[in-house]
Image (cartoon, helix red, strand yellow):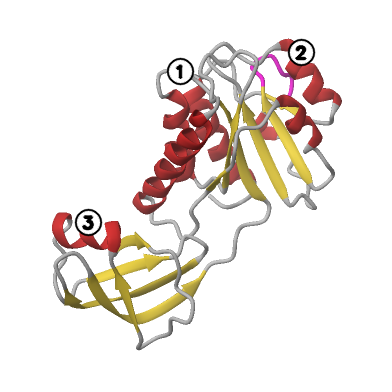
Amino acid sequence: MASLYLVDSLEGVSIGGSVTLDGAEGRHAVTVSRVRVGEVLRISDGRGTVVTGAVATLGRDALELTVSDVAAAPQPVPSLTLVQALAKGGRDEMAVQAATEVGVDHVVPWSAARSVSRWEGAKVAKGRARWAAIAHEAAKQAVRSWVPTVSDPVTTAALAASVSAESVLLVLDPTATDRLATWEPPTDATSIALVVGPEGGIDGSELDRLSAAGAVRVRLGDTVLRTSTAGPAALAVLQTRLGRW
């Protein structure tokens, strides 16, 4: 499969035209990947459009590609969101990476009651940028035409307020009665968000608040996964339940 690189925009690109890959992506292609003239690459805008073509010219840290194909992939419906509790030891970052590879569409950092890690002040912008960079690289590795968005951290109150008939909120809870593998996704849902707690689990008061707002508590199985693996594993189940895998 041709390598994938990301650019800010592919507006107006058509077959037979050209696309310039420069900046960090172009420099990586030329100096690290050492692409050659004639090599076929794929370039995406991260919002569904992917162009394929052969390298026509090479510069010191940029290249020009002649477009042979333009494809536009619609964003999946319902969209899948990972609401990942902030966690210590980089386990939240591991979750973001794997979830992106599995196919998550949006990532929402959650300041849970039991989160040891906290984003405050300047850490908010720094943390979000870090997660966005992880999602960016993971999307390239997985050759995804859509790069997940990463939002600012949310509170439990904001999560509770997000529940609606069209926006389903699933809470991973190892004590739940219902299994995710047998849960039936609503046919009219436009988005499904999966809430994953920190290493210490989701606080009881948070579970009650989310349940009262209409969230659905589900479990994966009889074992308890770490916060770094629970989200990606659950997303894989959802992809199967939705018929995408």
Q: Which residue is mark 2?
A: 205
Instruction: Look at mark 3 in the image and give the residue it sits on.
Output: 28
What amino acid is found at the position of numbered circle 2 in the picture? Ser
- Specify whether 35 is left or right of 203: left
Q: Position of residue 59 (x, y in %)?
A: 16, 72
The residue at which mark 1 appears reads as 88
Q: How far from the left and from the top, in percent, is residue 152?
A: 59, 38
Image position, residue 172 (x, y; %): 65, 25
The rendered magenta stretch, by its main secondary structure, is classed as: loop
Callout 3 amino acid: His
> Hey, which residue is sitting farthest front in the picture?
121
Which of disc 2 and disc 3 is earlier in sequence? 3
**Dot 2: what SS?**
helix
Q: Is residue 78 above or below residue 229?
A: below
Marks 3 and 2, how far apart at CA: 48 Å
Q: Which range is magenta? A: 173-178
Residue at image position (73%, 43%) is 185
Pointers 3 and 2 in contact (CB under 8 A)? no
Q: Looking at the image, tell me whether mark 3 or mark 1 is earlier in sequence order.
A: 3
Quadrant assignment, res 215: top right
Q: Secondary structure at mark 1?
A: loop
Residue in the image at 66% along x and 20% along y: 173
- Magenta span includes 8: no
Amino acid at pointer 1: Lys
